[in-house]
Amino acid sequence: MKKLQPVLMSGREVLPLVEGGKGISVSNGESSGAWAAAGGVGTFSAVNADFYDENDQLLPIVYKGKTRRERHQELITFAIQGGISQAQVAHERANGQGRLHMNVLWEMAAVEPILHGVLEGAKGLIHGVTCGAGMPFRIAQISASYGVYYYPIVSSARAFNILWRRAYNKFPEWLGGVVYEDPWLAGGHNGLSNSEDPLKPEQPMPRVKALRETMNSFGLSHVPIIMAGGVWYVREWEEWIDNPQIGPIAFQFGTRPLLTQESPISLAWKKKLLTLKKGEIKLNNFSPTGFYSSAVVNPFLEELDQRNQRQVAFTVTPIGEHDVQFLVGPRGRPVYLTRIDKERAEQWVNQGFSEALRTPDSTLIFVDSNKANEILTDQINCMGCLSQCRFSNWAQNELGTTGKKADPRSFCIQKTLQEISHGGNVEQHLMFAGHGAYRFAEDPFYQNGFIPTVGQLIDRLMTGD
């Protein structure tokens, strides 16, 4: 394999190996600090990060506000405290080596005040900010104002072209790199556009070549591209190294760092990763963000799929074939279904799915009473963790709402990610993973349940494996 060459990122030459940021306490100061200490680019997440007291004890997040807006303000305070705390841990663990980046999602709640709060409170500790999940136009201006490099995450040349022309051209000296995240292979939320088919993946090479051509046209031939999504063995990407059509290149690993000694996820989660088989990680469109996301198929995801399948369209007055009355809710309010759909609905009710919940699309989904109560409770407890939420109808605006009906076909993402990242049942919560996670079970490096340190993993990656 061609030798991996150092690449200039955030003002220093580093190994071209980048830790992918994973939110809700999964990429933390311990893991990112260890990655930087080994000479690469460590990335901690500032998406509702954990924070510690003066005795290094984890402080639980408890919301006391009675309204969503009050809880939303608490969330901002917690997020800033957590981000600063993780930056401090990462800085100490890095021991002056590598580079440390912070990852945020542009569609997370109050991203701008959180960025300002963390960058102000952790001055000199953070070298770069990576940002995706939306079109982060203002990430350049915010990062540059603190003398920090910015790394937009895009899934197409077109997206970067729009970002550059509208905003980034004003701050070219602080563009540290561009992360190309494969929308079919990366873990977590994916940047599939409306014109792309989630079932028809495209090869990354032509898309990245197009990105490089766009970047070169703006005089950015020296700026590295960071390939993210689907990277396991570097040797499988050998043709990308020293390739003039690709230019300076680094490789981002989001899934493999999960299975390290420094990774904060539970032992049960780590053991689960070692058992996955090909096809057990799938794209789904259940996320309250509205984005497709990649996660392990488990009972949590299966329940969402089944919930969405128990669905029929209704009208509030008889229209066309929707002429059969069906009573909904404790007050027995009538809606109208087709004859066939009423038969299906009655079958679901007889099976115990007795609660019919309305969706924003004039459909009903059928769940049992326990699930109905859980959905309602989660919607009531919303703390506004996203800029806008399909599940609870929260929106970060003056009204505090999207103006649409809350959608029971989705779920509270804050709740489930907090639960799984703090020891919750891995079968009953959302488990994000890249589509290559099945390779843990096939890779001889992990034989007999071996879990490496971050340093051991980076040494392995440098060999091509």
Image: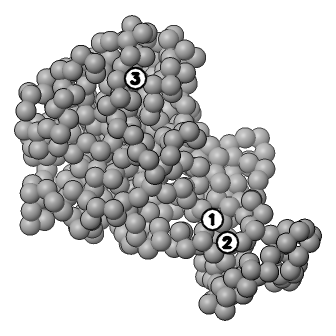
Taking the spot 72% from the left edge, 64% from the top edge, the residue there is 359
Mark seen at residue 211: 3
Q: CA distance from mark 2 to mark 1?
A: 9 Å
Q: Nearer the viewer, residue 344 or 165?
A: 344
Of the numbered discs in the image, which one, if any, rests on residue 311?
Answer: 2
Say few, some or many: other residues with alpha carbon within 10 Å of mark 3 (under 14 / 14 to 19 / 20 or more).
many
Crowd class of label 2 (few under 14; some 14 to 19; many from 20; radius 10 Å): many
What amino acid type should be assigned to the residue bearing mark 1?
Answer: Arg
Is residue 437 positioned above or below 210 on the image? below
Going by the numbered disc 2, the residue's amino acid type is Gln
Q: Residue at coordinates 13% horizontally, 50% vertically from top-left?
A: 453
Q: Label 1 near label 2: C-beta < 8 Å?
A: yes
Q: Secondary structure at mark 1?
A: loop
Task: Name the residue rendered at 74%, 48% in the picture.
Answer: 402
Quadrant where the N terminus is found in the figure: top left
Q: Quadrant of the C terminus?
A: top left
Tell me if label 1 and label 3 are in contact, CB under 8 Å.
no
Q: Which residue is mark 1?
A: 409
* Quadrant hosting residue 9: top left
